[in-house]
Image: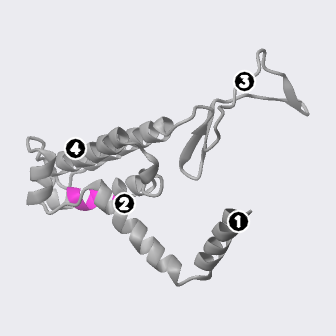
């Protein structure tokens, strides 16, 4: 993903066999929740995450108990089933450009407003009334907690040691 060159396919593709099975060429694959592909950039990961988050929000909005649905319940379901998909993007969030961050932030508020049935309000008004943090603030708080926890562990020392070795070699 951090390569300066995109991997391209040879034309024609070589035929690779493993025993009696033919090995198929693919353009992308999923590894640890992230979609990796030959295309450079974060667009694929963002688009796949947006699709999953929209599907989860639709499930949250369709949930009913006894024919009724409560805003508080939908908000809890949103935090339980939708927000974790946004947390997968927290560590790569600073690597996105400004338009991608703005788009994800707007999507977060749009889906949250949809779950709370407050779609007529602007994002800023909604976040003020419901005292809801922006996605940027969620990412920053998450990173600060992680770095604070990492600071007390042996892994932090190993990461700093590795970064120092890389700096001088």
Q: Look at the numbered discs 2 and 3 and tell me whether their residues touch, using CB distance below 8 Å.
A: no
Q: Residue at x 57, y 34 (%)?
A: 40
Tell me the residue that label 2 is attached to.
Answer: 139
Spatial separation of the CA atoms under disc 3 and disc 1:
36 Å
Tell me the residue that label 3 is attached to.
Answer: 9
Tell me the residue that label 1 is attached to.
Answer: 168
Q: Which of the labelled discs sits on residue 110, or is there none?
A: 4
User: Which residue reaches farthest top?
Assistant: 12
Residue 142 vs residue 25: left or right? left
- Which is nearer the N-term, disc 4 or disc 3? 3
Spatial separation of the CA atoms under disc 1 and disc 2:
31 Å
Q: Look at the numbered discs 1 and 2 and tell me whether their residues touch, using CB distance below 8 Å.
A: no
SS label for mark 2: helix
With respect to residue 117, does 41 lie above or below?
A: above
Q: Of tags 3 and 1, which is closer to the observer?
A: 1
Q: Is residue 79 magenta?
A: yes
Q: Look at the numbered discs 1 and 4 and tell me whether their residues touch, using CB distance below 8 Å.
A: no
Task: Mark yes or no: residue 66 visible.
Answer: yes
Spatial separation of the CA atoms under disc 4 and disc 3:
39 Å
Number of residues whose C-alpha sits closer than 10 Å to that of mark 2, classed few (under 14), some (14–19) or many (20 or more): many
Q: Position of residue 63 (x, y in %)?
A: 25, 50
Residue 53 vs residue 153: left or right? left
Q: Residue at x 62, y 79 (%)?
A: 157
Q: Residue at x 16, y 53 (%)?
A: 69
Q: Position of residue 165 (x, y in %)?
A: 71, 68
Q: Which residues are magenta?
A: 74-80
Q: Quadrant of residue 24?
A: top right
């Amino acid at each position: 993903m951090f390569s300066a060159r995109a991997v391209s396919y040879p034309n024609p593709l070589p035929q690779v066999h493993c025993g009696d099975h033919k090995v198929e060429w693919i353009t992308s694959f999923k590894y640890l929740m992230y979609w990796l592909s030959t295309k450079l950039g974060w667009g694929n990961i963002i688009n796949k995450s947006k699709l999953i988050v929209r599907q989860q929000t639709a499930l949250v909005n369709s949930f009913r108990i006894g024919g009724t649905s409560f805003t508080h319940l939908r908000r809890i379901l949103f935090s339980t089933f939708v927000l974790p998909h946004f947390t997968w993007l927290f560590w790569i969030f600073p690597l996105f450009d400004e338009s991608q961050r703005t788009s994800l932030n707007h999507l977060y508020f749009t889906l949250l407003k949809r779950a709370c049935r407050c779609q007529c309000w602007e994002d800023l008004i909604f976040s003020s009334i419901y005292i809801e943090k922006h996605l940027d603030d969620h990412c920053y708080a998450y990173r600060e907690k992680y770095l604070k926890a990492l600071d007390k562990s042996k892994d932090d020392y190993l990461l700093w040691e590795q970064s120092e070795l890389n700096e001088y070699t």
